[in-house]
Amino acid sequence: MKPLSIGDISVQSVLEHQGPTLTPDVMFPAHDPEAFASHLDWMVPAHFDVATGKIIAAFQSYVVRTPNHTILIDTCVGEDKERSNPNFHMKKWPWLKNLQALGLTPADIDIVMCTHLHPDHVGWNTRLEDGRWVPTFPNAKYVFAREEYHHWEAESARGAERIGLTFIDSVLPVVEAGQAVLVDNDHEIETGLWLEPTPGHSPGHVIVNVDSKGERAAFTGDLMHHPVQVRHPDWSTCFCWDLDMSGQTRSRYVDGFTDSGTLILPAHFAGTSAGHIIGSGDGAAFAFLED
Ligand SMILES: [Zn+2]
C-alpha cells in the first residue's frame, strides 16, 4: 500500500504476509457458491487464487502518525508463537524489517491499538527474549477494549487453548509490564481518533475512526475480511464469534459507509487494501485505491 494521508494524519501499512488462505466454503459457511463465482472477474488475481481455489488475504498492521503520536493498529501473527493454526505456528516473518523500512524502530511506537484479541491481531505485541515474552514496543501504551480483554481473560482461565495461549503469550506480558490500558468501546485516543464498538466477529471488537480536517477514515479490523463481504455482508466467517451478530453489524456499517467518502482500511484486504464503499446497481461494492 502507498502512504496515504487523511487531513493531518499519515498512514502506512506494515505487511507481515499475504497469500491464499482458505477455500470460500470453509471461510464463509453461509456463502452461495454461484454468487461467489459471479465475482471472479474482479476477484482474480488479487483477491482469489484460482490454482488453489482459496481466497487471498493480507496480514498487516497500520502505522498511523498524528501530530501527537505514532500509533500501531493491530500487530499481526508475530514470531515464535505456538498456535494450533499451522499458518500461524512458530513462524518467522520480515515484519520488523518492514517497520524499519518506514524509518521506525519499536521504541518509536507511542500507542498500540488492537481492534480485537485474535491471534493474528496481537502477535507482535510481544517477542521472545531469553525465553520470556516481553513487550516488543518498550515505550508504548497498549490500548485494549475492556470488554474484549475480559472475554479472553475468562476464555483463557477456562482453558480454551487456542485463544488461551494467545492471551498468555501476547496480552498478559503487556499487562504485567504495566503497559496495558483498558478502555471503553468508544474511547477517544486523541481528538479526531476514536473507537467504536462493532461486536460479532468477537464480543468487544472495535473499529478506529479518524476525522482530520474534515477527511474521514476507518480502520475496520475484522469487521470485513474480504471485499466479497461488502457485496454479501451476511457472509460471516468461520472465525466469527457470533455469525448472526457479525452479519448484522457488517450490514449496518456497509450501509453507513456507502458513498460516505470515508476511506476504509481493513486488516485483511489484499492488493492495495484501502478503498471506499460505493453504491452500485446491485448493492454496495468496494472500490480499491489505485496502486
Ligand atoms: Zn484477523
Image (spheres, rainbow, N blue to C red):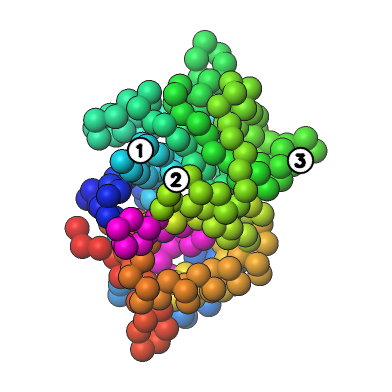
Number of other residues with Cα within 10 Å of mark 1, as a class: few under 14, some 14 to 19, many 20 or more: few
Q: Residue at the far top: name it.
A: 130
Number of other residues with Cα within 10 Å of mark 3, as a class: few under 14, some 14 to 19, many 20 or more: few
Which residue corresponds to the image point at 50% horizontal and 15% vertical from the top-left?
129
Label 2 CB sits under 8 Å from any ligand 1 atom: no
Q: Could you tell whether 146 is left or right of 10 in the image?
A: right
Task: Please provide the residue range marked out in magenta.
Answer: 210-228
Kind of residue sitting beneath label 2:
Glu
Residue 68: assigned label: 1
Kind of residue sitting beneath label 3:
Ala
Quarter of the rendering containing residue 6: bottom left
Res 53 visible? no
Quarter of the rendering containing residue 182: top right
Quarter of the rendering containing residue 145: top right
* The C terminus - image quarter: bottom left
Which residue corresponds to the image point at 41% horizontal and 58% vertical from the top-left?
218
Q: Which of 17 and 20 is in front in this view?
A: 17
Q: Which of 113 and 21 is in front in this view?
A: 113
Above-or-below relation of 51 to 126? below
Kind of residue sitting beneath label 1:
Asn
> Is residue 226 on the magenta stretch?
yes
Q: Name the residue under label 2.
A: 190
